[in-house]
Image: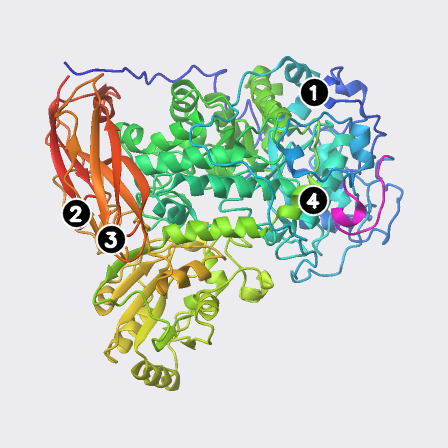
Amino acid sequence: MARKMHVSREVPAPVAARPTAAAIPEAPFVPEASFAPVAAAPFAPTASVLNDSPRRSEQVARSSVSRSWQAPQAARATPDWIPSANDINEFTSHASRGVGKSPATSHNRPEVGETPVNTAVSEPVATLQASENFRIHGTGSVAEAGGFSDTINDWERLLQPTKTVGLPELLEKTHMAPDFIPLPTETNAQHFDPNKPLTVDSYIAPEYNPLAAGDVPDKITEDVWKLVESLTLDEKTGQMQQIHVSQLLDRGGHLNTTAVEYWISRKKIGSIVDSPGNGNGEYAWYSAATLANLTNTVQQVALAQGSRVPLLWGLDSVRGANFVKHAAMFPTGIGLAATFQPKYAFDAGRIAAKDTRAAGYQWTFAPSADLNVEKRWAHNYLGFGEDPALLSAMVRSAVSGYQGEYKQDRTRVAACVKNFIGSGNPFNGKERSAKFIPDNLLYEYYLPGFEAAIDAGATSIMQSVGNVNGEAMSSSGFYLRKLLRDKLGFRGVMIADHEEILAQAREFHTAANFTDAVFLALNNTSVDMSAGDSSFSYNAMELVRAGSIAEDRITESVARILQLKKDLGLFDTPFAERQLQETVGSAQDVTAARMAVRESVTLLKNVNGALPLKTGDRVLFVGPHLNSTALLGGGWNVHRQGPTANERDDVYEGFGDSILSGVRKLTNREPVYHPGFRLDGSASDAASIEHLLKLAHQADKIVVGLGETPYAGHAGDVDDLSLDPNQANIVAQLANANRPIISVLVEGRPRLMREVVSASSAVLNTYLPGIHGGLPIAEILYGQVSPSGRQPFTYPRYEYQSRDTIWQGLWNEYTPQWPFGFGLGYSPLTYSNITVDSTELRPGKPVKIKVSIRNDGILDQRESVLMYTTQSFRTGYEPELFRLRRFDKVEVKRGMASVVEFTLTAEELAYYNRDLVRVIDPSPVNITINAMTPNERVITLNLSI
């Protein structure tokens, strides 16, 4: 009989009946311009905020401004008006210039229940007074101002449990910006941060240990419960609100203390996200020291005003601390996955955490546990490929790298795994479009990555965008409570993606209005925080006051948020760690990033010895991708969309390399280079093409860089996967020179290039290797390193194959350009036949599987060995073409042999049926090593129960 594990699909009962529009009206239009500024209250810090249990309403001066509700005339799909950074700047545009305190100015505001009819600002609003605890040191970096005690400079101290430091001591050591920053008359263009890290070459860092267990979210501690109980309702809902850092800046990109005190004193927010470089910040790429100056300054205001709970700062450090100037940048997720080495996911996470913490941020929105099925999807490059086993291993190591022992180690951050669940298979390939995935397939293929993250101790998870199977994810009790909390046992913080709850009313039409969307999210799910929806906290508060949401529901979320803040040490050390800044961009970190590139680059074709190049070859290098650091980086690199057209490679200020600079270093001569084509899609002029073809006839070999320009999110949406016609046309014209063409792909998703592949003697896929990828790619081109990467996704030959995977149904056609797991090296390897210790596979009796590999080449070779299973049949359900079960990567020295051993259990071959019950079907099972490669080996076992 089949073994079964029942999974209930029952959705928890709601806290309260869903209110009608009349019962829960939306907030009236009350412009914040009509509010009087809030004066800062003196702050008498205690030894620990957590011990401050009496009601905060008795300790901190609060604004008594109330906002009455009016029943809407009709349901609206937009939120209440919320001030942006520019709105707040308008309020202060006529304030006095200079440092110092200005008297508050009163303004007309409507009486309770009155709808304002004139929203113009009749008088200027002066800047808010700073707390008496502020220490004004002028401008400059944390390092310049002294930041922390100069005696705290021992790296090893950061790896030990952190000593509890009293807040008064911390405040004395924190550099502060002026309490008023003059506003320019117009927005300034971003320029380069003058701060450059004084980086050490090396430092002591934790080693990768796949068996090490890090910290995990645990029960809420008693002191956290006391703190939660001491908060008023508006302070609780404020903790559930995250805003973008740009809402704290003036139009010149400087910190606007009026805005800072508004969001902290009025809104009592709990979290701030992102770097000013992604908004209206003064600089394009902020150094850790400059970011630390900003985060420290705002953090001190949070400790002195509002709820006086430290802010949780979040940053998208998805491939290293990519938004921190001169931090080491790793390949994106698909590049890391191509290594088939989870160690590199750990390294990328650990180094990202350290550099993020150096800037005063404690939370990062990575790694991605999305299964990359739809290859048109713009964020294909952030994930770890299409296979659940590979994805799970990489995610587990990435979480370990980011977090480690985060409750004691102040070089680590909280990881936020994203996006739960199914984001990697959008119906039309576009960002945020609907996902249609049967629940049994969702459980079987899409869930394992998140299970691995939770098992590794993930402290937070971000929900998926849009809907799955027609059900709005942000209000799904099944997915976000029954599946995530109950089945997977997730105990950490769950955050809704940017304006995702708002989008249910504004875009997806799954809620009557924004208040309704907030009700559905709170009532049905266990969401704890909302990103970007600036009136989320207000609507949550009013829903509680109306009796539609129980305050205990709010308390539950706030407890999880504050427990995370405590575990990250924010109640002991809420500021940036200055000594970490000395390690940002260290030679040690850059070496780690380059090692990841060396093992990720994948050789897909190599005929007639086209590669490796010889130093004596006359090589023509063609294409902007070979001569750009920014293009190697792709998206999530300086900015979300990569460097701007004005910044280009200048923004790196020499930090990073290109493929040409790597070639220059290896060959010790200037490469012959021609741009070949234009990235904007326009055709090159005839004279330029004529010159290119003349150079091609003079060359022995031609290396062409092909691929994409940087993108992220909606900006990366495409209608099809075709390669830019201008790029394909250049290859076709170069082919007329009858010289070997080596095509180097720099792309975040597979682009269709059948004609290019036919015209090329060699094809090298570099994915998006990052700003340190140029030298390793050059080393592979010239044979100093033998390529060892493997395709982490199926590379389609035609558009209709954009969803093809290695685990699709056995009967389906599978004829891609290159299959999952494909990759060549320069050294020929010979595989032995597979040996097993038993041909009978049954529950409780695993089988050991061995294969031997011999290197007959002249180069040492790193080799990934992939083991798949294929059942000959399943009763009523189609078996997979190939299902990856195990993989390993070994070093095979030239002239030597290595043995690889795997263990397979019968339980692994269980699958979910439509009732969400896991069953095992007895049948013959093929064990395949390196499926669909020249070294494929197969043996058959008998599966029984």
Q: Position of residue 758 (x, y in %)?
A: 21, 66
Residue contact between numbered discs 1 and 4, judged by CB atoms under 8 Å: no
Residue 178 got which mark?
A: none
Relative to residue 136, is residue 850 drawn left or right? left
Relative to residue 277, is residue 805 drawn left or right? left
What is the quadrant of residue 272 in the picture?
top right
Spatial separation of the CA atoms under disc 4 and disc 3:
45 Å
Q: Earlier in the sequence, mark 2 or mark 3?
A: 3
Q: Amino acid at mark 3?
A: Pro
Vertical position of residue 462 compared to residue 195: above or below: above
Residue 232 got which mark?
A: 1
Residue contact between numbered discs 2 and 3, judged by CB atoms under 8 Å: no
Q: Does the magenta portion include 855?
A: no
- Residue depicted at x 32% and y 42%: 889
Report helix, strand or loop for mark 3.
loop
Q: Position of residue 556 (x, y in %)?
A: 56, 18
The residue mark sitting in front, 4 or 3, is: 4
Residue 292 got which mark?
A: 4
- Location of the C terminus by quadrant is top left
Residue in front for this viewpoint, 222 or 644: 222
Spatial separation of the CA atoms under disc 4 and disc 2:
51 Å
What residue does disc 3 label? 796
The magenta stretch is 133-147
Residue 814 got which mark?
A: 2
Residue in front for this viewpoint, 28 or 453: 453
Q: Earlier in the sequence, mark 4 or mark 3?
A: 4
Report helix, strand or loop for mark 2.
loop
Report helix, strand or loop for mark 4.
helix
Spatial separation of the CA atoms under disc 2 and disc 1:
59 Å
Q: Position of residue 715 (x, y in %)?
A: 45, 54
